[in-house]
Amino acid sequence: MKAQALIAIAVVATLATPLAARAQGIPGGVAHGVYEGNRRAGPVGAVVGGVVGGVVGGIEGVLGVQPYQASYSEPPAYSEPAPRPVRHHKKVVHSH
């Protein structure tokens, strides 16, 4: 009987470990959501951002998406080429 209980506990622990690891995305998502929401929309944004961040963090944890930092440089400002001078030639028509 003790051996069966030990095996059952080992199986449950083995199956529960990945779920606990996946749930780690929720606190990070909440923290990021609160920060961004507060930065953009104040206290109300912090509350909404926390909820949305927690949901997104949980989904990323379930899917196994790892957080990453990315840096993008500013693209050069688009400038139109300088206009080319256009020379208009008068066409002279003579009638005789």
Image (spheres, rainbow, N blue to C red):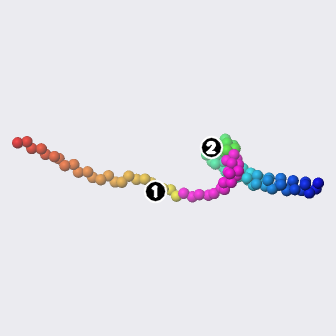
Q: Are marks 2 and 1 in contact (CB under 8 Å)?
A: no
Please tell me which residue lies in front, 61 or 50: 61
Residue lying at the far left of the rendered structure: 96
In this view, 96 is above or below 72:
above
In this view, 67 is above or below 40:
below
Q: Image check: 43 left or right of 73? A: right
Q: Image check: 81 left or right of 85? A: right
Q: Secondary structure at mark 1?
A: loop
Earlier-in-chain disc, 2 versus 1: 2
In the image, residue 15 lies in the stretch drawn in magenta? no
Q: Quadrant of residue 93?
A: top left
In the image, residue 65 lies in the stretch drawn in magenta? yes
The answer to whether residue 17 is seen in the rendering is: yes
In this view, 74 is above or below 93:
below
The answer to whether residue 34 is seen in the rendering is: no
What residue sits right under mark 1 in the picture?
A: 76
What residue sits right under mark 2 in the picture?
A: 41
User: Could you tell me residue 52's position as x and y percent?
Assistant: 67, 44
Q: Which residues are magenta?
A: 54-72
Taking the spot 32% from the left edge, 52% from the top edge, the residue there is 83
User: Could you tell me residue 20's position as x and y percent?
Assistant: 77, 53
Q: Secondary structure at mark 2?
A: helix
